[in-house]
Image (spheres, helix red, strand yellow):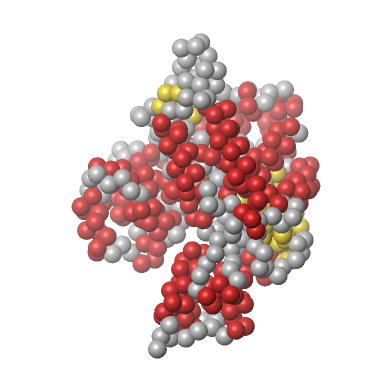
Amino acid sequence: MRDYSFGNFLHGLRERRGLSQYQLGMLVGVSDKAVSKWENGSAKPQIKTLYKLSEVLGITVDELLACKYHSAKNGNEKGVFAMKNKLWKDTHQALRTHYGNQLPVEILNRYLSEFAEFQETDIIVYFDFLSKIKSIANDMGEHIRVKGGIGASFIAYVLGATEINPLKPHYFCPHCFKIEFDETALCGWDLPKKFCSCGEEFQRDGHNLPFETLRVSVCKNTHFDISVSDRLYKKVRDMFAKYFEGNKVVTLVRKGHPNIKTLVVINDKTSNIANGDEFAFEEYYDSLRQYPSFTLMINKELDGFRLLEQETNTSFKDIDFACKDVLESFKRINTDGIPDFSSEFSKELINEIPVKTFNDLIQISGLSHGTDVWLDEVKELVKNGLSVSNIIAYRDDVFNYLQNKLKTTGISNTGYAYKIMEDTRRGIYARGGVSDEMKQQFISLGIDDWFLNSIEKIRYLFPKSHGALFVKYALILMWYKLNYKDVFEKYF
């Protein structure tokens, strides 16, 4: 007689970790057929395999055998993880400090949507840590660049952990907190300059990034890449050890790359891994990837940022990078020395795509980072007049396009758009095609043929938050190139 309870429980745990049967089998040393038998109830793992399963899936052997998963409770958590309630209270206060006490519904709704999604996770701990190291970097006159499950988060932006504002394009007055959203713009940097009724010039920001695009990063595979300057490297390592004191932190070291460290936080009382251990990245990353991790690396480009500021006596924060002269310089393909736009492929994209807005540059960055995105059919569409802003350059574009179509039929839930976005960015349709059932669904929603043709070829899609961050720094550096050409060319 088959035991379906264990199989169903194992299946749920595997799905929660985002693992296929083949991947789980590889991690515990068995075939995918063995995992399939466990899940359909026709077999059970041996005792020694149960211990490996418990380690990979992040639960105890007792929980596996009882088929009952217990989430960690605050009472069992150590160090900073026991302070999550306080961190959330501090975040609520930071929201009010940044945007005032009379919060517009649009801002409150975005904040509460993320809060509902993240409050049962540890993500607030990691956002808080990232905001603290950014603050230290600012105090030292240094720069830091963070990628991973952060850029599309409004909460991360409120805390100062990311520079990219995911709200819809808007005007914001830091003096009187007045906010005006603009439904026509695709990027806040493209809004014309404007003054608030209080006399202050409005800030212009917002990139319309749906928080759904970071759900996988937060709930299944929380990982952050942190690039720092040479002299900030040791400081961040020391901060990491102090911040997560009382919790297990191990270091993965890449062969031949001593200055690239992956720091893994093991907030799991059942793990038998000792705090402070070092392992070879190539051998241990797969078995530890279920735990949140931070890859810390030195980026010499960030030293150039500091030196530009020092020698020109002009801070990045004081630059009006979203100005006409900067955009015109990109249009002329004057991009030598500009990170992300100096490659021949990027120059080719600018040459083929009529760049009219800053959002067009962000789209071009996405096209250059994706795989099988800028293909002949898409080139032809742009050549025939389709705006680059309307094609698929990021995973966010897939989600927003489908969600807008769903709303026209009265559907507000995001599950369908999220599923197709995830499958597209992972290249599922490029490998297996779109089913006849899904094609019929597309017809009922009025999906354009070009959209279907695109997702059947795309093998990887970049998150727009990363593209917006890269473009922001490209725009800033272009400003220096135009205004301090000699100093710029010393370092870039």
Where residue 218 appears, as percent x and y from the top left, is: 53, 53
Residue 413 as seen in the image, left or right of residue 197:
left
Q: Is residue 421 above or below residue 16?
A: above
In percent of the image, x 60 and y 45: which residue is there?
Answer: 85
Residue 326 in the image: above or below residue 462? above
Q: Residue at x 51, y 25 (%)?
A: 101
Residue 429 location (% of width, % of height): 36, 62
Nearer the observer, 382 or 89: 89
Residue 402, horizontal then vertical, whole percent? 32, 48
Q: In the image, 376: left or right of 127? A: left
Examine the rendered structure and indicate whether residue 297 appears above or below residue 96: below
Q: Which of these two is toward me, 125 or 209?
A: 125
Q: Residue at x 46, y 72 (%)?
A: 9
Which residue occupies 38% across, 27% down?
A: 182
In this view of the protein, can residue 347 be seen by the observer? no
Q: Quadrant of residue 94?
A: top right
Left or right, 430 with reference to 150: left
